[in-house]
Every structure is written in structure tokens, then in C-alpha cells.
């Protein structure tokens, strides 16, 4: 009964959102940077990113928040791993961040100066930039490239090896030339090299612990200066970076980066309180709740929309009647309103891409083709009539029962199912049971075939060949149990089609067949992230990738005048901006590498070392220390008993307090923790009440408290907590 009450409440909430969306306008605080119009490059339509018109300046540190990854090896594909690695490492090639599109036409060189293919596209030769050094002073050579290619394509050493099925071997021709041998021509090979995970690593540090700062030796614009586990990554400017801007000035512009380990609930308050300059280079606001919190709390923020390369589809189990009848699937597809499904997913239609199929705009069918193919170009009443006719023809004029499956949550996939279930009930008399379940239960049901419709991500990325995962016979993600020999053959050959025009037509033909056979239904939920940042952060641009060159911050700068308006002071700087910066109309001349000066800025943030040290013998309430544990209630807990704890603190006024609980015996960071709080004007802060996980064993646990003061400095203290 409780389950159905929750679902009914969710349906009512979604219906309110749908109703409001018909008349609601964009929030008045929304300030999206305008992008230039489409441009034609060859035979491809590209979408440029916003152009920054102000001149760059040196100095300052950008602060943002995200989870510190458990591995800094971008080849391991762990969450946020490439985001931490990209300021340090470069790639052979990358996608031009001046465009939103991630297609072959936007691949440009990074460590590679140029490259060429042999006649049958089975050999690819890279010519490398010369004179580049690793952060430890060792020279960068072809040996490092061969080592990295062999490593990233080896499934025993890399989690991205599946991106390179065509790779056979590579060889060093000389110190600055590498030849790659492919098993067959592969259109996706160089595109996957442009993915942010495909970084080049130093051969001389092979075997270094990928969770250590010693691993973070790269050729990139920033050097990892300090790793504070579970707290922060501190990067400093690489004064010997090998890249220059279009005016001939040394990159990067920034003095450094500070990346704080904050969970999603803590990032927004830190942006609003101006402790952070931006949410981060990867994750923005993907729902109305997050967007509204930031736009109302900090109306001066600027926003850019980043359309993601991950979609969402409703997979229909073709092993079940009547979903094995194309007439039934077509009837259901006629009643798809992608705007409403996007609202169910994220709360507002602006977070998705209506009138789209299974592929993102970079290489999917044109919108007009999709609308016509799906029958969405007809008036709604005609679509309903045709859908009802098809159901009657198939023998289901009175509908049928439908078991909808998704992973749990209040929106996202279950929101899509709730909205679509209401449409099917209203017009086709289909009675849907909507199940939002935990991952383990979902896996069990998928294995047993206990579902009719499963709504899940469709992760294709930059390579449409990845559709084989979801629609090729026996594919690991073929939740529809779909089998079409024509599609199997087309997907098998797609990667081998090198000619861009022929490849594009083949991709479109594949999508046409899928939208005709309808083993799955499109949703439009290529959920966009709206990326917020303060207006003094300049030259930010995003494409469809989660991990792109924007994560390097190599050509991002801080506008000192706007920074002073926002913060009331100038940003700290150790670099003098050149006085000879040419205007955009001038012809840039040669510029010498800039050496950082050592003049300290008068507004430099004090370091945590200025805080008095807490003695080991202190009872955690030393009044001379700026963090006082007023009370921990109860003072001890009980193992395996879900103890509820409340902690009262005295800290600097306005400080952000964040607590982690490290379990006894295992020492693991528990998923159970209190919400972050900001101390009031008197310095009082209360964390909790919160419940320790019932599986926590008896023993000595650790409470780790991170206090971030309003000047940005952090205090990290720990104390034991006994579970009897």
C-alpha cells in the first residue's frame, strides 16, 4: 500500500510539472551565454561554442567541488578519474572545444603535431611535438606513446580497451614518430583517442601506484602540488607548459586549481556562498531543483547548456506478448511526447532534446526525418486515433497489463515510466505496474526476463558502433531481445566505413531501421547539464563529452575586475600579465615563455598552517583551537544497531561543516553521514541527527570533520567514536 501511495504522489507531482511547463517561462535569473550560429565544415554542420571577446589575463586560482576519484589513472574509467587527471596529462589528439560537436571533423592535435593514414587506412602515423618534458624533467618521446597505447588497449591493464577493438600494435619510428597498425580500417579509432580517458602516460613511471601523487606526473598545464586524501587536490601552474595561445603567450593563464571533495548536496551551498567559482568542469545542474537553488541563490551566475552523449530509451521485451507485435509497439510509439518524458526525467523540458531518436544531434538523423518516421508530424488527435486502430487490429482494444521496470529514484528513469504509463492508461487502456527498484533486484529481474518495459541509459558516446551493445543479437545491453540480421551486419561493418559521407548515411540507415522496428522507444532524455559559473571565469566551453579539454583549464582565465566586484578583492596572483598583449586585430608576434614572479599578492589567502595545532591529548574541546566538539550524543554507539547520532560544534562563523564516518574494522567511508551545515553568526553548528549504518561492526570508528572557513581555508580534524 505504501508503495502505491508513493507512486500516486509522484504521478501527481509530475502532472503538476507537466501542467506548469505549458506556460512557464525561463527563470528571470537565467543567463545563458549565446553561441554563434551553425557553421559548415566540409559537408558537416557544426555548432560553435560561445566566443570570449575579452582579452586573457594571468593569475588567480579557480576553486570547484567534486568527488576525488579512487584512481588517478584515466584508463581505469573510474568516476571522476579523468577529471582529476586531465589538468596533468595530455592526449595524442582531442576534440576541438570551440565546437559542441564530437565528430571526426572536430578532432585536432594535442601531443600529436600531425598525422596521416596509409592508403587502406590500416596504418596511422603520428608526428609528435618536440621539446616537451614531463613534470619531473624527463623528455617526452615516442616510447611514452607506444607504452600508453599498449596499456590503454590491454584489457588486463585498462578499462577502456573496448574502445579500441581494431588496435593491433604500435612501433617507434624515431623519438618523435609513432606508427600504429590496425587489424582493419577503423573510423572510430582516432575519435576514441580524442576521448578524455585516452591520456598519454610516462613509460618511466610504469607500475606507480595510481592512487598516489607520484602517479600524477604528466605533460599538462598543471602540476599536482598537494593531495589531501578525501579533502582536496591542489594544482599549481606548470611554468614550462609547451603550449601558447593564439597571440603567442604562454599557457596556462591561471596560477592553479583547487578541487574540493564535496558531495553533490554540499556543492551548491558552496557556490552560493562564493567559496567555489563554479560547480565543476564535468557535472552541472541536471534537474529543476538544483538549477533553481543556484539561480535563485546566486542570480549573477552565468550558465552554459552541455548536451550529454548519453541518452535514455524504453526497451520493450520482444519475448513477451503483445510487445512482439509491431502494431502494438507502433501504437505506443505514436503517443510518445518527448517533452513530457523529459519533464518526468528532470523536471523541465529544457534539460533534454525533444524530437530526437536514439543518437545525439552530432550524428543522428535530422529532426525532420525523425518526426516524420515516428508519425509525430500529425496532429495529436490523429495520432491517438491511429494508435487505437492499431491496438484494435492487433486484438488489444481493451488494452493489457504492462510491467515497467527501472532503477529507483524520484525522477530520472522512473519519472519517464510514470509519465508514459499515464499516457498509455488514458488513451490505450494499458494498465502499467511501475517498479523502481534497487540495482540488485533490477539485475535479478533482467536475468529472469521479469519485465515488459525497461527504461535505462543508452550510452553510445562518440561512436555509433556502440549501438551494437543494445541492438545487436546477443548484445550485453540488448534488453529487448531484439534480433535483426540486417542490423547485425550493418553494425558489424560500421566501424570499417572510413568515408565520412558513406559512414553518415550508414548511421542514418541504422537509426531508420531501429525507429521502424521499434525494439525500444526514444525518450528525448539526452539530459543536459546546465553548467554554472561566476562571470569572472572566462573562456569556458563545453562539448558533448563528460571529459573534454575543458577539464584541463589550460586556456581559462579570471577577469580581475569582475572578480573584485564579486568578492570585494583582487584574486591572488604570482604571474604578471604581459603588457604587450596584442588586440584581436593585431598580428601576434613571437612571445618568450613567461616565468612566474614571486611577488606575493596582498590579499593572499592564509594557509591552514596559521591555525593553532590541536594536541593529541586534547579532549576535542580545546578552546584555543577553532573547532570545538561541544557534544556528541550519544557519546558511544552500539555495533549493528543503527545508532542515531547528533553532533554539536562551535566553529568559525559562516564555516561549512562536513562530516564523514569511517567504519570500524574495515576503515571504509560510510554512505551514511549527516548533511553538511553552515555555522550561524555565533559559530554554532549542529550535524544530524543521522543514523549509523546498521551493518557497522563493533569497534573504534573515526569521525572526520572538515571545516571550510569563509576565506576558503580548511581545517580537518578527527576523533574516535566507539561502537560497543
Image (cartoon, grey):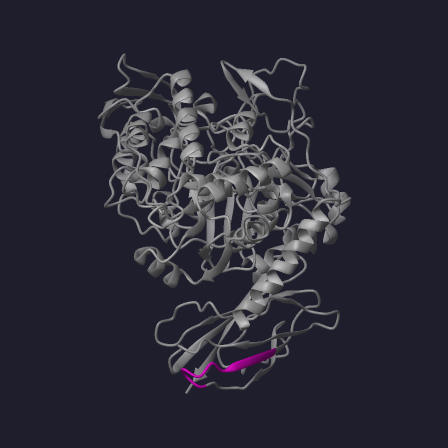
Vertical arrangement, residue 104 with respect to residue 602, above or below: above
Total numbered badges shown on the rendered structure: 0
Residue at x 50%, y 59% (from the top left corner): 231
Foreground: 276 or 421?
421
The image position of residue 600, as x and y in percent, is 63, 45
In which image quadrant can residue 99 be found?
Answer: top right
* Relative height, residue 402 to residue 149 (above, below): below
In the rendered structure, which segment of residues is drawn in magenta?
A: 638-647
Q: In the rendering, at what x and y percent does residue 165 appear?
A: 27, 33
Residue 603 visible in the shown view:
no
Residue 217 appearing in the image: yes
**Foreground: 254 or 432?**
432
Residue 167 appears left or right of 222: left
In which quadrant of the rendered view does residue 38 lie? top right
Would residue 70 be counted in the magenta stretch?
no
Q: In the visual, does 458 lie left or right of 355?
A: left
Magenta span includes 643: yes
Amino acid at each position: 500500500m505504501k508503495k502505491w501511495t508513493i507512486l500516486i504522489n509522484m504521478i501527481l507531482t509530475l502532472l503538476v510539472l507537466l501542467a506548469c511547463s505549458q506556460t512557464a517561462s525561463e527563470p528571470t535569473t537565467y543567463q545563458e551565454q549565446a553561441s554563434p550560429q551553425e557553421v559548415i565544415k566540409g559537408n558537416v554542420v557544426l555548432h560553435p561554442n560561445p566566443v570570449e571577446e575579452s582579452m586573457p589575463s594571468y593569475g588567480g586560482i579557480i576553486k570547484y567541488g567534486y568527488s576525488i576519484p579512487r584512481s588517478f589513472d584515466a584508463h581505469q574509467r573510474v568516476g571522476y578519474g579523468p577529471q582529476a587527471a586531465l589538468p596533468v596529462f595530455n592526449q595524442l589528439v582531442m576534440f576541438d572545444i570551440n565546437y559542441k560537436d564530437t565528430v571526426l571533423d572536430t578532432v585536432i592535435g594535442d601531443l600529436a603535431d600531425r598525422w596521416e593514414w596509409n592508403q587502406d587506412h590500416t596504418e596511422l602515423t603520428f608526428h609528435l611535438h618536440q621539446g616537451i618534458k614531463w613534470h619531473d624533467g624527463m623528455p617526452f618521446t615516442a616510447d611514452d606513446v607506444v607504452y600508453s597505447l599498449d596499456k590503454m588497449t590491454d584489457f588486463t591493464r585498462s578499462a577502456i580497451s573496448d574502445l579500441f577493438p581494431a588496435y593491433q600494435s604500435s612501433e617507434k619510428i624515431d623519438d618523435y614518430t609513432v606508427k600504429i597498425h590496425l587489424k582493419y580500417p577503423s573510423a572510430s579509432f582516432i575519435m576514441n583517442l580524442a576521448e578524455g580517458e585516452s591520456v598519454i602516460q610516462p613509460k618511466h613511471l610504469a607500475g606507480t601506484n595510481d592512487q598516489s601523487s607520484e602517479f600524477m606526473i604528466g605533460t599538462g598545464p598543471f602540476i599536482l602540488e598537494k593531495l589531501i586524501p578525501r579533502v582536496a587536490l591542489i594544482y599549481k601552474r606548470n611554468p614550462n607548459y609547451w603550449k601558447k595561445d593564439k597571440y603567442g603567450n604562454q599557457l596556462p593563464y591561471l596560477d592553479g586549481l583547487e578541487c574540493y571533495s564535496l558531495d553533490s548536496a554540499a556543492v551548491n551551498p558552496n557556490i552560493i556562498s562564493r567559496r567555489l567559482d563554479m560547480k565543476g568542469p564535468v557535472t552541472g545542474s541536471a534537474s529543476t531543483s538544483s538549477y533553481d537553488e543556484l539561480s535563485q541563490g546566486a542570480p549573477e551566475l552565468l550558465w552554459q547548456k552541455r548536451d550529454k552523449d548519453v541518452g535514455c530509451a524504453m526497451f520493450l521485451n520482444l519475448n513477451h506478448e503483445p510487445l512482439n507485435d509491431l502494431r502494438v509497439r507502433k501504437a505506443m510509439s505514436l503517443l510518445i511526447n518527448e517533452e513530457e518524458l523529459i519533464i518526468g526525467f528532470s523536471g523541465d523540458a529544457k534539460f533534454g532534446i525533444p524530437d530526437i531518436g536514439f543518437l545525439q544531434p552530432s550524428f543522428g538523423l535530422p529532426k525532420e526525418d525523425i518526426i516524420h518516421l515516428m508519425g509525430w508530424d500529425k496532429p495529436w488527435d490523429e495520432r491517438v486515433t491511429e494508435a487505437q486502430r492499431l491496438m484494435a487490429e492487433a486484438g488489444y482494444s481493451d488494452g493489457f497489463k504492462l510491467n515497467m521496470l527501472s532503477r529507483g529514484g524520484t525522477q530520472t528513469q522512473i519519472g519517464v515510466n510514470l509519465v508514459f504509463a499515464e499516457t498509455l492508461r488514458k488513451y490505450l487502456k494499458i494498465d502499467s505496474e511501475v517498479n523502481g527498484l534497487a540495482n540488485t533486484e533490477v539485475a535479478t529481474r533482467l536475468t529472469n526476463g521479469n519485465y515488459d518495459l525497461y527504461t535505462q541509459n543508452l550510452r553510445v558516446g562518440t561512436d555509433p558502433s556502440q549501438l551494437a551493445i543494445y541492438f545487436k543479437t546477443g548484445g550485453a545491453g540488448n534488453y529487448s531481445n531484439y534480433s535483426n540480421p540486417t542490423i547485425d551486419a550493418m553494425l558489424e561493418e560500421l566501424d570499417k566505413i572510413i568515408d565520412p559521407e558513406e559512414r553518415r548515411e550508414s548511421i542514418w540507415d541504422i537509426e531508420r531501421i531501429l525507429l521502424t522496428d521499434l525494439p525500444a522507444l526514444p525518450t528525448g532524455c539526452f539530459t543536459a547539464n546546465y553548467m554554472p559559473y561566476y562571470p569572472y571565469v572566462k573562456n569556458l566551453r563545453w562539448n558533448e563529452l563528460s571529459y573534454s579539454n575543458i577539464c584541463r583549464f589550460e586556456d581559462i582565465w579570471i577577469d580581475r575586475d569582475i572578480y573584485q566586484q564579486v568578492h570585494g578583492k583582487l584574486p591572488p596572483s604570482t604571474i604578471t600579465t604581459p603588457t604587450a598583449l596584442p588586440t584581436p586585430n593585431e598580428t601576434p608576434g613571437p612571445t618568450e615563455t613567461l616565468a612566474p614572479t614571486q611577488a606575493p599578492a596582498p590579499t593572499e589567502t592564509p594557509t591552514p598552517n596559521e591555525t593553532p595545532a590541536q594536541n593529541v591529548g586534547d579532549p576535542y574541546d580545546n578552546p584555543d583551537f577553532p573547532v570545538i566538539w561541544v557534544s556528541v550524543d550519544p557519546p558511544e554507539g552500539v555495533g549493528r544497531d543503527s545508532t542515531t547520532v547528533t553532533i554539536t560544534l562551535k566553529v568559525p562563523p559562516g564555516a561549512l561543516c562536513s562530516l564523514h564516518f569511517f567504519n570500524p574494522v574495515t576503515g571504509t567511508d560510510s554512505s551514511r553521514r549527516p548533511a553538511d551545515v553552515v555555522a550561524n553568526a555565533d559559530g554554532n553548528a549542529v550535524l544530524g541527527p543521522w543514523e549509523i549504518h546498521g551493518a557497522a561492526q563493533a569497534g573504534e570508528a573515526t569521525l572526520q570533520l572538515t571545516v571550510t572557513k569563509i576565506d576558503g581555508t580548511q581545517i580537518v580534524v578527527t576523533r574516535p567514536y566507539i561502537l560497543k
